[in-house]
Image (cartoon, grey):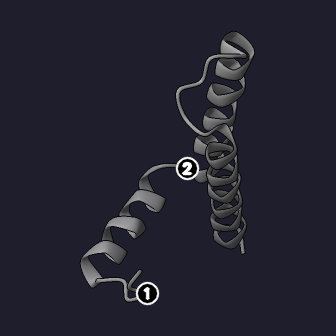
Amino acid sequence: MDNNISTALLEKIKHFIETVPPERLSRNLRNLLLEHLLVQKDGYTFDMDDLLLDMMGLFELLEAIETEGKQ
């Protein structure tokens, strides 16, 4: 994977961070995921381990964005 991030992508990320509160997004995604897991429980058609690892990484990023924004 290319580690260079284009200026256009950085601008889109900045716009997203400025318009979507990371704390709210993180909380809503967690609630959605947990609600789904409680209802579904079995029969997933995807790799749950990959999903959970990816979601944890996303939550950590959102929390870091929120923390940095408060400094």
Other-residue count near label 2 (Cα within 10 Å), few / some / many at <14 / 14–19 / ≥20: few
In the picture of the structure, the residue carrying the numbered disc 1 is 3
Figure check: 23 above or below 16: above
Which sits in the foreground, 6 or 18? 6
Q: Secondary structure at mark 2?
A: loop
Q: Nearer the viewer, residue 54 or 69?
A: 54
Residue depicted at x 36% and y 63%: 15
Dot 2 amino acid type: Pro
> What residue is disc 2 on?
21
Q: Quadrant of residue 38?
A: top right
Marking on residue 69? none
Secondary structure category for the residue under label 1 = loop
Disc 1 marks which amino acid? Asn
Residue at screen point 47% across, 49% down: 20
- In percent of width and height, residue 2 lies at 38, 85
Location of the C terminus by quadrant is bottom right
Residue 39 percent coordinates (x, y): 68, 10
Left or right: 10, with 58 as reference point:
left
Q: Quadrant of residue 33?
A: top right
Of callouts 1 and 2, which one flags the residue occurring earlier in the amino acid sequence? Answer: 1
